[in-house]
């Protein structure tokens, strides 16, 4: 088992994200979107941070602690103008 690398959100622009969906099950995808929308409410109402774990195009798994500003079906916008494609997000931790 490999150690997840925690990166600063400012470095997100240096990564290429996975082009394929990283989750297999429908339930996992529904729960991920539910968690992202919950993280959006936390970020907008309380400026709270969450840990987002994502997969890069090189199949590396990374994490970032950040505030979620908005969520769509395809992308998550983060504080500082960064975004992550939803398909590359493995998990959201509160």
Image: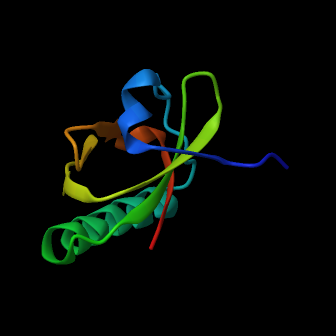
| Along the viewing direction, whichever of 91 and 31 lies nearer the viewer | 91
Observer-nearest of 39 and 28: 39
Q: Which residue lies furthest to the right in this view?
A: 1
Q: Classify 73 as above or below 33.
A: above
Which corner quadrant of the image does residue 69 belong to? bottom left
* Image: 57 above or below 35: above
Q: Residue at x 47, y 39 (%)?
A: 88
Residue drawn at the location 20% of the way across and 77% of the way down: 46
Name the foreground residue: 20 vs 17.
17
In the image, residue 27 lies at what x, y percent? Answer: 48, 64
Q: Name the colour scheme.
A: rainbow
Residue 57 locus on image (x, y percent): 55, 23
Q: In which quarter of the image is residue 32?
A: bottom left
**Which quarter of the rendered picture does the C terminus lie within?**
bottom left
User: Is residue 59 found left or right of 35 in the rendered image?
Assistant: right
Percent of width and height locating residue 59: 64, 29
Q: Residue at x 15, y 68 (%)?
A: 44
Q: Which residue is at the far bottom? A: 46
Q: Give x and y (percent) for residue 86.
A: 36, 44
- Work out whether 48 lies above or below 78: below
Residue at horizontal 25%, vertical 74%? 42
For the image shown, how many numbered marks are present on the structure?
Answer: 0
């Amino acid at each position: 088992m490999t150690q997840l690398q925690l990166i600063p959100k400012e470095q997100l622009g240096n990564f290429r994200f996975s082009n394929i969906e990283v989750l297999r099950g429908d339930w996992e995808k529904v729960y991920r979107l539910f968690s992202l929308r919950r993280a959006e409410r936390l970020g907008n109402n309380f400026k709270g941070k969450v840990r987002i774990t994502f997969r890069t195009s090189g199949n590396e798994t990374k994490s970032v602690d950040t505030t979620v500003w908005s969520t769509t079906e395809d992308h998550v916008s983060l504080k500082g103008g960064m975004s992550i494609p939803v398909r590359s997000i493995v998990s959201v931790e509160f």
